[in-house]
Amino acid sequence: MAVETVSPRRQRVLFGVGIPLTLVAFAAFIFWGFPPLYGLFWDSTCNTIDAWLVCSNFLQRGFTAGALIGVAAPVVGLYLVNRQMALIGEALAHTAFGGVAIGLFIGAAVPSFDYPLVFALVAAAIAALGMQYIAVRTEGYADVPIAIMLTGGFALGIAIISYGVVFSTRVESYLFGDILFVPFENVQLMVALTLLVGLTVGLTHKQLLFITFDREAARLARLNVWFYDTLLIVLTALVVVAAMQILGAILVAGMLVIPVAAAMQLTSGFNRGMALSVGIGQVAIFGGIILSYVWNIATGAMIILTAIVVYLWALVYVWNPTVGAILLLGSVLVPIYLTSVVLGGLVTVGIVGIYLLVSARQ
Amino acid sequence: MTPPITVENVSFAYDEQPVLNNISMTVEDGDFLGLIGPNGSGKTTLLQLMLGLKKPDSGRIELYGTRADKYKQGTRLAYVAQQSTEADTMMPVTVREVVRMGRYAHAGLMPLSETDGRLVDEALETVGISDLADRKISRLSGGQKQRTYIARALASEADLLALDEPTVGVDADSVEAFYDLLGELNEDGMTIVLIEHDIGVVIDHANMMACLDGKLYEHCETQQFLESGALERVFNSTHGLAPGQLGGRA
């Protein structure tokens, strides 16, 4: 009994000091630690591989932002999906788009305020808290408020854009996502958001899981369910804003939901499900970016389509592991085969060419 | 010693629709209370009030001497609801992960310790599902699932276990084994409050009975309860059942 009364107080002191310190450390890292690390990593990668894919500044920023989203979005998404809240992300993203519109409008008038993502963050956070308020009032995340918020936020954005003078390419980059349009400050913002999401989930994973799985029992264990619900929805808002750069307001929810849906097919445990969701998220991001580069297709769309292909494959694998394995092997071997055919052809042509050249000289 | 639950003159209504009317009762330490009554008689509401999940409109409810809705020591309470909540039919979560939840309220924001892990293993052992520990909970049978929730309650070292019709949709053999397990836990000192529609099962295992239909018809020891005729009065008045259909196995 004595141990139980002392340890929460020690915990409170530990976290009361530890969390602010960690946040300060985060800020220091993002401003001073991250940029040199980022430069070091990409320079060395570029030196070893030397392909345009990893040497282009645009794609370097895109890959970094993508990798961060590929971690944060599935982690938060796993809780959302298991609470039947999959569409919350979509509603928040559309509201965030309203915030972007306001930000662009103000930014056009006052250039020193030209940070649309910060406005998006504020709009999404307000929407998240509003959603939570409605949910408490109506005892659940009903689809009618979600639909109203989704369309309402979007309508507000369109209204402002149609009124103000805003470059349409910038608007489009927030609507559909644009990997070539990620400024370095936004990469920094994404690092910050991802670290914040990671820290929060790391600390409160147990509570979030308990409430997700068995709400009544969690209330009985005297967890502050309202607090953790609010925390989760605010985290969602953060992730959505971070992901909007790459995927666009319209496609953001896909990254919260699809990798999680695929992972849920393949695993029986929650923690393993989280690891697998992140893995699938990374596959979707990197596969999507590379394919979009190879085939010259919009990146956001390609990321989501790649994620869906992984999901469909997971369904096949669960239905029949042999067929799944063959498909996986095929998807690896066929490109290798095709590449080797092409390479073999080139080598043959080369050898024949050299032979002809040599024989012509003689 | 303060009794686990005291209920004094409690009334409760959902939007002007009265559900409970002036209920008073006490659950003593080590009791196994069977709470019975027809559908819509307010059993679940009373249980939720007792556990502090709802506030009474009037009257007073105390958990271990503290007002129930202000009671903070969640670690002393455990709850097993009717099975098949939406989450446990699709969510990927293993049996061990569910049982570990019993330790969450103890751990707070800290990671679980080795002691926590040992208690989880012991709980799995006690209810006899160690071999299922890494299975997905949705793959388990109804009886196995309910054992998992009992293991979670054990792992949390709860003193008071509340169950709301825990064996709906569980096959007959597993129901027997489940109630034997509850009986053992009760003998080891755990206080149990059980809502159950199968009156025979309650009569076999509970030492106290309470019969509810908006108001409390009878609350006393099981044998006394059977002789009191409360069952017949409640069920006859609302459902017109013949007395012989009730408590058949007692």
Image (cartoon, coloured by chain):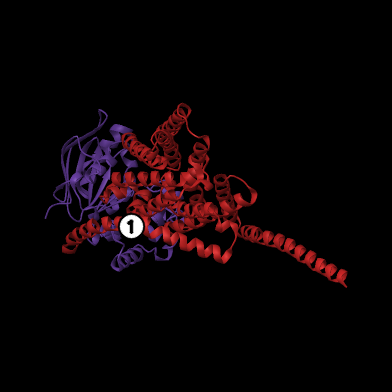
Chain colours: A red, B purple
Identify which amino acid the numbered label 1 is placed on. Ala
Q: Residue at x 49, y 36 (%)?
A: A171
State whether residue A182 is above or below residue A151: below
Q: Residue at x 38, y 50 (%)?
A: A213
Residue A308 picture location, percent across and down: 56, 48
> Looking at this rendering, what residue extends furthest in the bottom direction?
A362
Residue B186 picture location, percent across and down: 25, 58
Is residue A329 visible in this depiction of the protein?
yes
Q: Quadrant of residue B125?
A: bottom left
Q: Quadrant of residue B191?
A: bottom left
Q: Nearer the viewer, residue A57 or A67?
A: A57
Within-10-Å neighbours for mark 1: few <14, some 14–19, many 20+:
few
Residue A5 picture location, percent across and down: 17, 59
Q: Is residue A233 left or right of residue A183?
A: left
Is residue B177 visible in this depiction of the protein?
no
Disc 1: which residue: A28
> Looking at this rendering, what residue extends furthest in the front direction?
A361
Q: Nearer the viewer, residue A263 or B59?
A: A263
